[in-house]
Image (cartoon, rainbow, N blue to C red):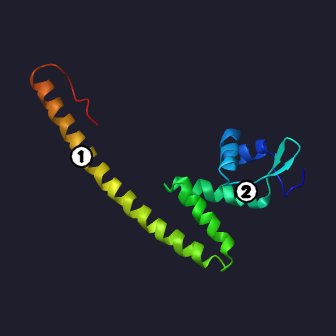
Amino acid sequence: MSSETMTIQQMSADFEVTPRTLRYYESIKLLCPQRSGQHRIFSKGDRVRLKLILRGKRFGFSLEEIRQLLDLYEIGDQQRTQFQRTYELAQERLQIMEKQRTELDETIHELKHLLEQAHTHSTENGWVEGDNLN
């Protein structure tokens, strides 16, 4: 094994994913490691692809969106198309995440208000002693 290649165990450890995850990504053609008998040999390119896959997942992209973005790399236009599509998807994802954050902030505010009311009601009726709210 050269410094340019890694085993499935090394990839799993380095990227903190399970071997099963790597095998799944291979089965859906997101990763294409070389084979040496029964062993998978991951190249530097596989490591870059996995890093991009995991980043895409962290940003909330679907595996199909990630596949499309990775496939655009192969077009041969110095990644111009890939960059443009990534930018568009990232803008869409950011809008979704900001909307979700706003909704979550509103829900947290409502829940805190509900807890305050419940606490006030409980202390007025002698059901709770002291202040347990944060």
Q: Nearer the viewer, mark 2 or mark 1?
A: 2
SS at mark 1?
helix
For the C terminus, the image quarter is: top left
Compared to 59, does 130 lie above or below? above
Residue 47 placed where, x, y %?
A: 73, 56
Q: Nearer the viewer, residue 47 or 64?
A: 64
Q: Amino acid at mark 2?
A: Arg
Residue at the disc numbered 2: 47
Q: How many residues crowd around disc 1 within 10 Å: few (fewer than 14), some, or many (20 or more)? A: few
Instruction: Tell me which corner region of the image, top left, top right, bottom left or bottom right, holds residue 75.
Output: bottom right
Residue at mark 2 to residue at mark 1: CA–CA distance: 42 Å
Residue at the disc numbered 1: 109
Q: Amino acid at mark 1?
A: His
Compared to 73, does 117 lie above or below? above
* Rendered residue at 48%/54% (across/down): 60
Residue 31 placed where, x, y %?
A: 70, 54
* Rendered residue at 65%/80% (across/down): 77
* Rendered residue at 50%/57% (across/down): 59
Residue 37 placed where, x, y %?
A: 89, 43
